[in-house]
Amino acid sequence: MSSGAEIAEAGIAAMDPAEARAGVARRLRRGRIIDRWFARLTWLSGMAVLALVLAIAGALLVGALPIIDRFGLDFLASRHWNPVSEQFGAFTSIVGTLVTSAIAIVIAVPVSLGVSLFITELAPGWLKRPVGTAVELLAAIPSIIYGMWGLFVFAPYFADHVQPWMNDRLAGVPGLGSLLTGPPFGIGVLTAGLILAIMIIPFIAAVMRDVFEAVPAVLKESAYGLGATTWEVFRTVTLRYTKAGIVGGVMLGLGRALGETMAVTFVIGNSHELHASLFMPGNTISSTLANEFNEATGQMYTSALIALGLILFFITFLVLAVARLMLLRMRAGEGKTS
Amino acid sequence: MKLYTRRRIVNAIALTLSVAATIFALFWLGWLLWTLTSRGIQSIDLAMFTERTPGPGDSGGLANAIVGSLMLTGLGVAVGTPLGILAGTYLAEYSGGSRLATSVRFVNDILLSAPSIVLGVFIYELVVLRSGHFSGWAGGLALALIVIPIVVRTTEDILRLVPASLREAAAALGAPYWRVVVSVVYRSARVGMLTGVLLAIARISGETAPLLFTALNNQFWSLDMGQPMANLPVVIFQYAMGPYADWHDLAWGGALLITFSILLLSIIVRILGRTSNPGN
C-alpha cells in the first residue's frame, strides 16, 4: 500500500529524472521478485496440505502391511482378537463402530430436525440466538467430558432407572425384545450410542439450520398463501427443497460419530465380543485404539491396531465424500424442482 | 371442516414435538454443566495451580498438566497457523479455481473430518517410532494436524469475503500483489482470521485421543519438549479411570477448568464473528 506513495515520493525527491526512473524500475523489479516468491510460498503450503493427507494414508497403509500380508481380507471378517496367540480380526470393532453410530443417527436426526425447525420457524426473534448458541455449545464441550459424565453420572442413572424399566416393558416385543433388554450394567453399546447422539446433534442441527435458511421466502409464502399450516409448509416445501442438504448434514454428523474416541471409550465397556443385546459391552475401532495402542507389544499387535486406524480413516473418507456430493448437489439444484 | 381440524391438530403435534426436541437437546447441556460445576468446584483451589499431579495416596494439583497443555497447544498453533494461513491464501488468492486447488480443498476437508485418534497413530509412526520415545514435540505436532485444516478453511472463507474493489484499488496505486494481499486483504480480514485460530485453539485444548500415544503423560515437572509431557486431557483420563476418590476429584476439577476455558473461548469467537465480516 505504501509502495505506491514511496515511488511517487522517490520520483519527486530525485533531482535527476534518469536516476528516478532507475529507482522506480528497481522497486518494480524487487516487487516482482517478492511477488513470485510469495506466490510460490502459498502454493507450497497448499501442496503441503495435499502431501500431508497422502502421507497419512501412506503411513497407515505401510503400518498395516504386516497384518494385510498375514491375514488378508480375513482380517475384516474374523471375530477373534487374541493378542497372546496373535489372532487378530477387526469384525467386532467395525460392527461396534457402525452400530453405535447408527444408534446415534437414529436419535440425533429427528431431534436435530426439531431443533432447527424451532430455531428457523418457531422461535421468537429474541430467543433464536440464545437457543442457537446453547445448542452449539454442546459441540464445544470436549469429548472426554462427555465420557466422564457418561461413566460417573449417566450410566448409573441409566442402570438404576431406565434399563430395568425397558426390561419390564420391552421383553415380549418382537425384534426390539432381544435388542433392548439385558443385564442393566449402565455402560454398554446403547449408552455409547446415546451419548454419541447428544454429541452430534449440534453438528447436524447447524447444517440443517443453514440449509433451511437458504429456502427462498417466496416459496414458503406461496405455500402459506394456499392455506398450508406451518408443519405442511415445512414438510412439503422446506424439507423437499433441502433434501440433499439434509443428507449432507446427516453424513457430516455420521462422520463425527464414527471417529469419536474418548466418550465411547469411557462408556462402551471395551469387550471384543459380539452380543445380540445392546445393553452388553462392546467396542469400536477408536476405543480399541485408545485402550490398547500403548500396551501393544510385538509387530503384529501394533500392525493390527494401525490397520484398524486405516479402516476408520477409509470409512470416514467415504462418508465425507458422500456428504460433499450431497451438499454440492443441493447448491447446484437450488431453485429447481427435485 | 373436519379435515381442517385434523390438519390443525397434526400441525400442533408437530410443533410441540419440535419444541420438545429443543428442550431435549438443551436438557443434556444443562445436566452436563450442572454435574461439572457441582463436582468440580470443590477441587478448584490454589493447590490445583501450584502443585504437581500426585501419585496414589498423595495430595497435589494439576500445575504441570496445565503448563504442559499450554505448551502443547502453543506448539500446535505455532506450527499449524502459518501453514494454514498460507495454504488458505493460496486457495483464495492464487489458485483461480484450478483443478489442483479443488483437490487441495477436498483433501483439506478429509483432514478436517479425519478422526483425531487416527492423526495420533500417524504421528506415532512418524515421530515416536523413529525417535524411540514419546515426546512433547510429537504431541504438539499431532495437535497441529488438527489446527491446519481449520485455519485453512476459515482463512479461505474470510479472504473470499474481502471485496475485489479493495484489491483493485491497491493494485491501481501500483502495489505488487503480495503487498495487496498482506497489507490490504489480510488487514481487512484479520478479525476473521483470528477467529479461525481461536476456533482451532478451542478445538485442540480438549483433545485427548491424539495425545494418548504421542505426548503420553508425565507425573513430574518437565518443560522438556523432548520428553513425555503432562497435559490436562490425558491426566483427566487417567485419573478418572483410576481407583482413588481424590484422583476422581482432581479429574472433575480439571474437567471444569478445561470446559469453562473452552466455553469462554467459543463465546469470544461468536462475539468476534459478529464483527468479522470484512465487507462492512
Image: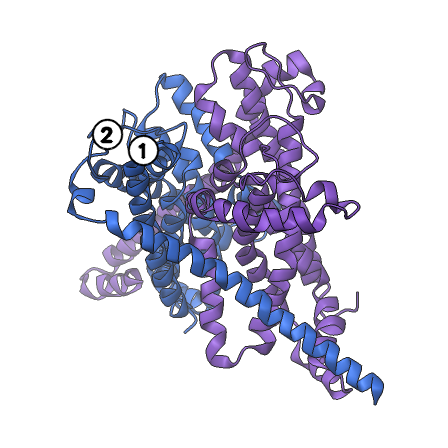
> Quick one: label 2, few (<14), some, or many (20+) residues within 10 Å?
few
**Observer-nearest residue: B190 or A215?**
A215
Question: Is A192 situated left or right of A8 in this image?
Answer: right
Point out residue A247 in the picture as x, y percentages from the top left corner.
Answer: 69, 55
The tally of labels here is 2
Mark 2 chain? B
* Mark found first going from the N terminus, 2 or 1: 2
Point out residue B70 in the picture as x, y percentages from the top left corner.
Answer: 27, 42
Chain B drawing hue: blue
| Tag of residue A283 | none
Q: Residue at x 15, y 47 (%)?
A: B46
Q: Write down the residue under mark 2.
A: B57
Q: Is residue A86 above or below residue A148?
A: above
- Chain in purple, by letter, is A
Q: Quadrant of the C terminus of chain A?
A: bottom right
Question: Is A107 situated left or right of B47 in this image?
Answer: right
Q: Is residue A317 above or below residue A330?
A: above
**Observer-nearest residue: A268 or B205?**
A268
**Contact (CB < 8 A) between labels 2 and 1?**
yes
Distance CA(mark 2)–CA(mark 1): 8 Å
**Observer-nearest residue: A64 or A296?**
A296
Q: Quadrant of the N terminus of chain A?
A: bottom left
- Rendered image coloring scheme: by chain
**Mark 2 residue type:** Gly
Figure quadrant of residue A311: top right
- SS state under label 2: loop
Q: Residue at x 38, y 42 (%)?
A: B80
